[in-house]
Image (cartoon, grey):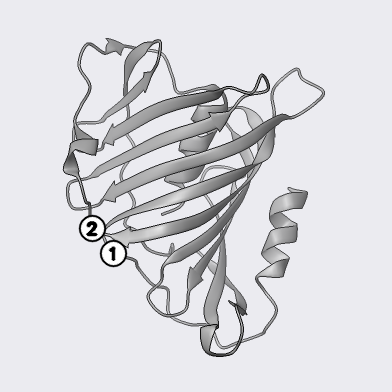
Amino acid sequence: MFLSCLLASFFVTNAAVEPQKCCVDRQFEALLGEFGGALLPGKNTPTALDGFNLMSYDYYAKMMRLEAHMNQPDGTVQVTNVIIDYKAGKEYVKTDTGCTVLDTTETMREPCVPAISRFLGNTSFGYGDTTLKVNTWQYQKPGSDNVVNLVVTADGCVPMVEASYGTMNNAKTDVVYFITSFQPGIKDRSVFTIPTNCQQGGSTVGVVGRAVRALKDLF
């Protein structure tokens, strides 16, 4: 909680008239640098969340793809591919050990600042002619204790930072995403190709499961 609150304070420096809640492109790709920690049930020390995620988002097709790269304590990198087909109600999770398909009843959220969000204020990145103005919003995900601080550009509503804290997959989690390489549209639709030979059942748990949950909260 401390990390997310601290970063949120950095992005709220000026009181301002509340702008209209905005939406971003319904199709986009982005890279999300991830940093934070999760306190697993029964553990006394947190597990680090350190890595990056490639995200492809298509609201029209109701598809989302995440390629999560998570740094492990032994120096290796765990790569997990997740494809969520909201129309079919399926979530496909593929790792180097196999593929699992899960049922999901979730509805894909429109890529907009949620209507329940509270405007915290605005600030800017850069200096002079290179200044980039941003607005910060905060909301609590309904039915949970997850609080999300979302920083978007004042012009264009492009997401810049997401800081989230609360309980994710039964673990107290505090995680921040720095969003870069944002690009409207989908360059290669093969990223949504459903993997074959997936086994039914299981769940997206552990570090990757919490990353998936937080990224779903982005929009």
Q: Residue 166 placed where, x, y %? A: 64, 42
Q: Quadrant of residue 45?
A: top right
Q: Is residue 85 above or below residue 28?
A: above
Alpha carbons under labels 2 and 1: distance apart? 8 Å
Q: Is the Cβ of the residue at disc 2 closer than 8 Å to that at disc 1?
A: yes
Residue pushed farthest right?
A: 44
Q: Residue at x 75, y 17 (%)?
A: 42
Residue in the foreground of this view, choosing between 146 and 152: 152
Residue corresponding to mark 1? 25
Earlier in the chain: of badge 2 and badge 1, it is 1
Q: Which residue is mark 2?
A: 185
Q: Nearer the viewer, mark 2 or mark 1?
A: 2
Quadrant, the C terminus: bottom left
Query: From what the image shows, is residue 146 above or below residue 21?
Result: above
Per the image, label 2 sits on a secondary structure element best described as loop
Q: Nearer the viewer, residue 5 or 189?
A: 189
Give the quadrant of residue 135.
bottom right
Q: How many marks?
A: 2
Residue type, numbered disc 2:
Gly
17 or 145, nearer to the observer? 17
- Picture coordinates of residue 153, whole percent (x, y): 47, 73
Q: Residue 161 vs residue 22: left or right? A: right
Q: Is residue 84 left or right of residue 133?
A: left
